[in-house]
Structures are given as structure tokens and as C-alpha cells.
Amino acid sequence: DTAVSQTPKYLVTQMGNDKSIKCEQNLGHDTMYWYKQDSKKFLKIMFSYNNKELIINETVPNRFSPKSPDKAHLNLHINSLELGDSAVYFCASSSRTHLVGGDTQYFGPGTRLTVL
Amino acid sequence: AQSVTQLDSQVPVFEEAPVELRCNYSSSVSVYLFWYVQYPNQGLQLLLKYLSGSTLVKGINGFEAEFNKSQTSFHLRKPSVHISDTAEYFCAVSDPGGGFKTIFGAGTRLFVKA
């Protein structure tokens, strides 16, 4: 069973379009994250939800809107896509309630977004 | 504010040679420290972590790291690398007091040559 899954794995679209990426975790974790990894492999946190509540919202354009319908899902919707949005987007989850694990994060396989 | 510096962007090494990937952090509070590995076209996975206790931490695939509080370092080592260790390695720090944010370093590309 895949612990953290993302769909789609690849997304190629035109500038100006709107697209969504979905993430699901079956680990029973209470916290989920979206990260953006650029072409130089730099990993930057975008958002985090804890028990469906937004707790981290970095300086991300408001074209990006996360939604967490329940603790196991965190989706990312992007409006009016721009060339600079091309990157790999990773979803991750962790358990903050039980910090015995030290907030180890479990990552999905990534979604490679290409904006043409 | 916390920060993580990985001192080498790329480390080429021959197979079966030892390797050290360097990581320094800055924080005004105690921290949790992590090393993650990212194989090509995959997500990150945990190699090892330091929460408390023994400063020498052993992880998967023969890797280990040593926490040095006075030097604020958490260097990753392996005595003998394999071709399959070729990957991107990320050092990360989080605040056990809360904040829900883990800060990742810029990554070190380990390239193992035959």
C-alpha cells in the first residue's frame, strides 16, 4: 500500500490554465504539507494543514489554494498558471500529535508540472 | 529563525570509498535533525534522525551521522559507498517546541563513480 500518493504524476498544461493536484495519505497522520522543488532541487514549503486547519502559509501567490476536505487529503489548486510555476510539487505528511517520531515527514512521489 | 547550510552542492566519489556530506544549522533553541535521501524521480525518504540522547545516529543503508552541538553540525557519513547511493541528500531541522515547519537545506548531490 502506498503511504502518500499524489495524482497526477505528470501534468503538462498551457499558461493561463487552472489545474489541481490531489494528495492522499493512509498513515493516520494529522499534518500534511505541500512543497515546491525547483530545477535546482531546492525544496520550499508552501502550505501545511494540521487536522484540516491551515497552519503554514508561506509567501505563495494567491493563485495557489490548498484545500483539506479531511485529515487524509490535501489538494492543491492553481489558477492562471505561469511559466514560473513549472516545478515538482511534493505532498508530505507527519504526525504532530505524537511527536515521539520527531515529526518525520513522509513524502509522496511528486507531481511534475510543466507550464508551456 | 532556524536555517540549514549544506556546505557542498556536489560530492563525486569513487565506489567503495568513504564519504562525508556536511551540514550546519543555526537555531536559538534545541532542534530535531534529519537527513533525507531523494533518488532520481522519487520523493524524499528518511535516512536517519537525531531527536535526543546519543549523538551518533545510525540510519538505513549503512549511513550514520553525528550531532555536534558546539559546532552546530550534523554531518552524514558512510564508510564505503555503492553506485546505488547516487542521489540527492537533504539535511533538515525542525523545532520540537512546535511551529510545524521543517527547514530543508539546499541538498547535496552525491555521485558515485565506478
Image (tube, coloured by chain):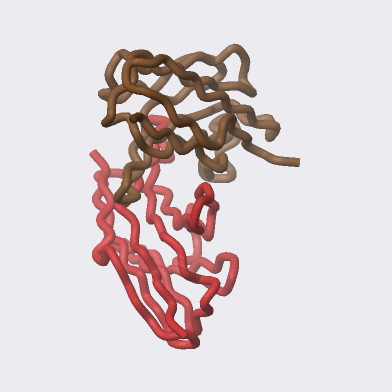
Chain colours: A brown, B red
- Please provide percent x and percent y for residue B5: 25, 56
Toward the viewer: B84 or B96?
Answer: B84
Give the mark count: 0
Picture quarter containing residue B113? bottom left
Question: What residue is drawn where x is 35% and y is 47%?
Answer: B104
Question: What residue is drawn where x is 55% and y is 68%?
Answer: B58
Quadrant for the N terminus of chain A in the image: top right
Question: What residue is drawn where x is 42% and y is 49%?
Answer: B32
Toward the viewer: B94 or A37?
Answer: A37
- Please provide percent x and percent y for residue A84: 27, 31
In the picture shown, does residue A65 fall above or below A115?
above
In the picture shown, does residue B49 fall above or below A10?
below
* Side of A98 relative to A42 (left or right): right
Question: What residue is drawn where x is 48% and y is 83%?
Answer: B79
Picture quarter containing residue A4? top right
Quadrant for the C terminus of chain A in the image: top left
Picture quarter containing residue A108? top right
In the picture shown, does residue A18 fall above or below A108?
above
- Please provide percent x and percent y for residue A103: 51, 41
- Please provide percent x and percent y for residue B20: 37, 75
